[in-house]
């Protein structure tokens, strides 16, 4: 007796095979066939003559299963969803595809580099935590996702949910102070372990017992399925689920109307329309602009080697407040102000006047993805130019105009989905992270038997990044302060020169506040 998931025998090149309903739907979807529900009844639309009589027969036989799949799904670009993650596979999002391209060029390694370390205090119920982890992994498709090749195309494949097997390691610690060295070793194990993205897992978690009533939870995810905001979402949902498990309640987590795979389907559907509407703008805007190169240090010691470093930047509460008030007076945002100052410094540092800057921020622009674990970025390629007499005010006006024009033609990572172009994908980038590197929006979590707090940890994965890219600025808005730094490859730049760049950025912000009408080209660089 055949399974209900298997339709009649189909024929391909004269060979018979059993075709499951998800495979049938994916095959006809590629042909342009669209399904939806109308008053509970299955409807479909297909280009003329693309469906054979056999296809129509199999669709009729599988009507109930197709209807059930669509009813369980919850989104399309118009609000009705088409089959996506519920079929267990979907196209890559454009941000994922950009990363995948870099893996193919061997310029980036697959590592669980997005990580958090959380201290849990109290009488921890290990079994309840295991069940909570299982519930969260079941709730978020991205945590069960691998990247596989289907018909020669990289594709998200979502594994079926299963019970989470959490192991607990015992650590020796003095008093109530965790052993930072031991914690860093476990972080290294999770973040530096080589990953086959087709086999996974791309997500992992580890629990360390450091003392009676004190545990450390380490969470690590590959960037293909996660970003910093995803860590906050994961921790929030885990603590909600743990409280419910303690109370023996059924799990009830914040709704996720759009899974990461659904987002990939939406972007794929929108691609042709985007090209027709905005393609000519970007082709013209980015034409005849090459790669902007920072002056490399010529006398680097041989042992500088591979890997990345960071020159720290700290914008304290006083400076941030002044910049915020100045930005309000100019009717702009703190992000635009800090970006325009960065552009001015880069032009001054590189002795350049025309370049494309990658402006990246959080890609959760829709409320439907606010609870979604995944990799969401909002990249804009901004063509900036600096004339001889341009002041800070002039550069800010240009930044605002270019940002607004780019936003009107927003690519939502479309450009990064193409095969990497060195003049754009390797140029310097400005990254603004609104919630901080370890922000925890945990207002939905009820007080329970355990308390939680974030722990600092080393980020050893930086030593494994070997991409030939220019230094980039990453700023984390932590509320009263802004922290971050200039990330740079060791084989091209010294810590001394990049620390000098970081100091120059801070002095440039001060110079803006002191005299925004001063010429950018007269900017003094830190010694």
Image: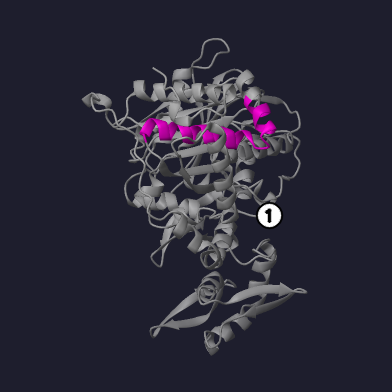
Is the residue marked by circle 1 packed among few (<14), some (14-19), or many (20+) residues within 10 Å?
some
At mark 1, the secondary structure is loop
**333 inside magenta stretch:** yes
Residue 91 to residue 327: above or below: below
Image quarter (top left, top right, bottom left or bottom right) of the N terminus: bottom right
Above or below, 40 against 374 in this view is below
- Residue 509 visible in the picture: yes
Residue 329 left/right relative to 296: right
Q: Position of residue 256 (x, y in %)?
A: 67, 51
Q: Residue at x 55, y 37 (%)?
A: 394
Compared to residue 121, the image places residue 354 above or below, namely below
Image position, residue 302 (x, y; %): 21, 26
What main secondary structure does the magenta stretch of the protein show?
helix
The magenta span reads: 323-351
Where the C terminus falls, by quadrant? Answer: top left
Q: Which residue is mark 1?
A: 257
Rendered location of residue 352, percent (x, y): 38, 38
Q: Residue furthest right?
A: 39
**Point 66% across, 61% down: residue:** 75
Where does the image place residue 150, in percent across and percent down from the top left?
A: 42, 64
Residue 202 can be seen, yes or no: no
Q: Nearer the viewer, residue 103 or 84?
A: 103
Taking the spot 59% from the left edge, 58% from the top edge, the residue there is 262
Q: Nearer the viewer, residue 194 or 306?
A: 306
Check residue 147 for magenta coloring.
no
Which residue extends farthest top?
175
């Amino acid at each position: 007796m055949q399974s209900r998931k298997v339709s009649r025998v189909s024929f391909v090149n004269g060979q018979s095979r059993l075709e499951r309903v998800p495979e049938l739907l994916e095959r006809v979807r590629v042909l342009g066939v669209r399904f939806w529900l109308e008053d509970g009844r299955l409807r479909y639309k297909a280009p003329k003559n693309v469906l054979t009589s056999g296809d129509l027969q199999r669709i009729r036989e599988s009507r109930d299963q197709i209807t059930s799949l669509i009813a369980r799904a919850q989104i399309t670009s118009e609000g009705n969803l088409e089959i996506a993650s519920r079929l267990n596979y979907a196209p890559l999002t454009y941000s994922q595809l950009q990363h995948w391209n870099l893996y193919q060029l061997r310029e980036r390694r697959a590592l669980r580099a997005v990580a958090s370390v959380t201290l849990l205090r109290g009488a921890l119920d290990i079994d309840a935590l295991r069940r909570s982890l299982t519930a969260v992994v079941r709730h978020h498709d991205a945590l069960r996702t691998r990247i596989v090749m289907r018909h020669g195309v990289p594709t998200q494949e979502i594994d079926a949910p299963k019970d989470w097997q959490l192991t607990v390691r015992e650590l020796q610690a003095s008093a109530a102070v965790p052993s930072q060295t031991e914690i860093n070793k476990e972080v290294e194990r999770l973040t530096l372990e080589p990953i086959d993205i087709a086999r996974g897992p791309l997500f992992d978690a580890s629990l360390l017992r450091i003392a009676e009533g004190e545990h450390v939870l380490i969470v690590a995810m590959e960037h293909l399925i996660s970003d910093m905001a995803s860590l906050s979402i994961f921790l929030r949902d885990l603590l909600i689920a743990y409280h419910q498990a303690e109370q023996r309640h059924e799990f009830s987590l914040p709704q996720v109307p759009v899974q990461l795979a659904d987002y990939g389907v939406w972007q794929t559907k929108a691609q042709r329309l985007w090209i027709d509407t905005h393609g000519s703008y970007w082709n013209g805007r980015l034409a005849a602009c090459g790669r902007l190169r920072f002056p490399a240090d010529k006398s680097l010691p041989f042992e500088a080697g591979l890997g990345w470093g960071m020159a720290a930047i700290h914008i304290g509460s006083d400076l941030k407040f002044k910049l915020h008030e100045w930005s309000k007076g100019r009717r702009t945002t703190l992000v635009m102000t800090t970006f325009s100052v960065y552009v001015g410094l880069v032009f001054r540092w590189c002795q350049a006047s025309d370049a494309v800057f990658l402006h990246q921020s959080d890609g959760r622009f829709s409320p439907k993805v606010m609870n979604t674990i995944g990799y969401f970025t909002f990249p804009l390629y901004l063509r900036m130019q600096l004339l001889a007499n341009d002041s800070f005010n002039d550069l800010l006006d240009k930044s605002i105009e270019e940002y607004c024009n780019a936003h009107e033609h927003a690519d939502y990572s479309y450009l990064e989905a193409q095969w990497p172009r060195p003049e754009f994908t390797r140029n310097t980038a400005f990254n603004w992270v609104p919630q901080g590197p370890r922000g925890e929006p945990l207002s939905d979590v009820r007080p329970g038997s355990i308390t939680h707090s974030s722990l600092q940890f080393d980020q050893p994965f930086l030593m494994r990044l070997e991409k030939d890219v220019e230094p980039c600025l990453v700023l984390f808005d932590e509320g009263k302060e802004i922290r971050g730094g200039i990330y740079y490859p060791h084989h091209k730049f010294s810590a001394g020169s990049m620390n000098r760049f970081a100091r120059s950025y801070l002095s440039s912000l001060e110079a803006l506040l002191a005299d925004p009408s001063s010429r950018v080209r007269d900017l003094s660089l830190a010694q």
